[in-house]
Amino acid sequence: MTEPSPEQTALPPHRWLSLIGICGTAGIVWLAFSDLGVAIPKIADEFDSNFSMLQWANNAFSLVTGALVIAAGKFGDLFGRRLMLQIGTVLLAVFSVVAALSPDVEWLILGRGLMGIGAAMILPASLALIPPEFSGRAQTAAFGIWQAVAWGGLSAGPAISGFVTDGLGWRWLFWLNLPLAVLTLVVVRLTTLESRDPGASGHIDWPGLATIGLAVFALLYALTEGPSVGWGDPRIVALFAATVVLAVAWYLIERRVRLPLVDLRLFGIRAYNGALTANLTMNLAYAGLSFLLVLWLQNVRGYSAVEAGSLMIPATVGVFLGIPFGGALDTRRGGRPPATAGLAVASAGLIALAFLDTGTPIEVIAAGLFVVGLGLGLVSTPVANTAVGEVPADLAGTAAGVFKMSSMLGGSLGVAVLTALARELTAREASGVLEGSGLSDAEITRVRQTLVNSDSYQEAVDMLPPDVRGEVVRVAEDSFSLGVADAMGVTAVLTLLATVVVFFVWPRRARRARRAPSEEVGGT
């Protein structure tokens, strides 16, 4: 565990103020990840744009962030993690202005994509700044607070977006980033210690940076577009092939280059591998669950987007309650017990949601979500504490970058794979009745394509012939419910399998890595 330096022990009151600034900056990023989706219908009306284009405005942010986050973590090791955090915050604020002033959807996509550059710099730096200022129980608590802010931002984003969009207009989702950025910048500047690896060379592994960035971008792009254009589309196949080729090229480069972008000895740390696996699974499960369930609540139960997002709050409550328990267990017994227990608890909540149908009471859904959130809360602190706080000091930024990349990949995989699975299961359930409904082939195709699309579902229903509309709607809702329930069941099984993998990969009691004496910690 990190030993406090003389500079740290001289300023004990400031580290908690510093944590507020660090977590506040990360909170802006997580809000930005989740706040645009609810506003898309109103943006579509203003720009007279189609849903597909606006989905790219939503996804551009995560695509750019995921592609650059490893490189940004490495730059933090080289040039200073606080510096990266500050530059990232400025870029996020400046490019928020581009998005806020966008005259059309193309400019909005550009603004969101450029905001992702700032987010990529903020996330690994905000995590890597914690170990130099905290140690022992305080470090575990600090990582728990960071995770609570992240989950809070992701969960509260849709509801906040709904209120802002309805009250002030969707452009204020971007304008509000400016005062928040200024506030956090001031706090970080006055209270946060700079840290870097003073022994690091200024050499940049540009081939490694290019190959891993392009590989992650290709994979995220394929996962984003695959559900809408079809997994057999030549572009998607080519992107997956490019991902494999680029990943292999990156591995070969990192093995041979003298100063690699990602030191491969990171992956020789079993606890780190266990934390990455648990983090990937956690993000996959929650992203897929929340995306599908919000669609189901709108399409089948008739809730608005804001109401559906608000009904996810039980999961957030569970996360907040689980985080301190996970942190306490991590302190006493290491990261493996709370990580494996948390994944097992989350899978139990997913199993409860696997019995979803059109008549399932909201209270039952809320209970299942609470259990899932409780499990994810147990996992959150141990994985962050292990992946960032228990690696050699000179790898902290890189480790944080890889860790956050696993979050991006997990979230994208969850939405893409579970959406595709639910769509296929839904179509199979509905195919018999649709084919016997008297609809034309074109009408059947349209209904199938919109069963899991909340923005065009009602429009498709309204276009159906009145004499078959009621039956088709009933079948569509029953089939969608069964498809979502089955997808929850599959996610539960995947989470249980990941629990077993983490149990065997993660050592019984991870050895606490001590910070190297050369770790440089500067003043404010």
Image (cartoon, rainbow, N blue to C red):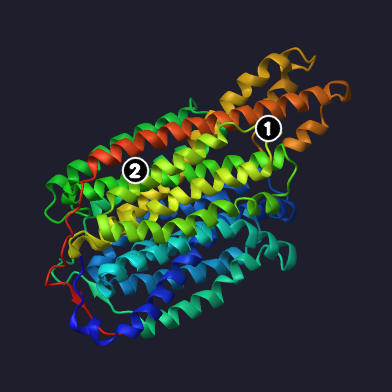
Question: Looking at the image, is 24 positioned above or below residue 261?
Answer: below
Residue 506: quadrant of the picture: top left
Say which of 334 and 410 sits in front: 334
Check disc 2: other Cα within 10 Å, few if <14, some if 14-19, many if 20+: many
Q: Name the side, left or right, on which 347 lies relative to 405.
A: right
Looking at numbered disc 2 in the image, what kind of residue is underneath it?
A: Ala
Say which of 261 and 211 sits in front: 261
Q: Which mark is residue 215?
A: 2
Check disc 1: other Cα within 10 Å, few if <14, some if 14-19, many if 20+: some
Residue located 34% across and 44% down the image: 340
Q: Name the side, left or right, on which 447 lies relative to 176.
A: right
Real-space CA distance between mark 1 and mark 2, rounded to the nearest whole angstrom: 31 Å
Residue located 30% across and 50% down the image: 210
Question: Looking at the image, is 463 positioned above or below residue 391?
Answer: above
Image quarter where the N terminus lies is bottom left
Residue 167: quadrant of the picture: bottom right
Instruction: Please state the horizontal and vertical placement of residue 221, each as a whole percent of the image.
Output: 46, 42
Q: Nearer the viewer, mark 1 or mark 2?
A: 1
Q: Name the side, left or right, on which 82 lies relative to 368.
A: left
Q: Name the side, left or right, on which 258 lies relative to 231.
A: left
Instruction: Please state the horizontal and vertical placement of residue 463, each as a whole percent of the image.
Output: 82, 30
Q: Residue furthest top?
A: 436
Q: Secondary structure at mark 2?
A: helix
Looking at numbered disc 1 in the image, what kind of residue is underneath it?
A: Thr
Q: Which residue is mark 1?
A: 450
Is any atom of residue 200 visible in this view? yes
Residue located 33% across and 74% down the image: 83
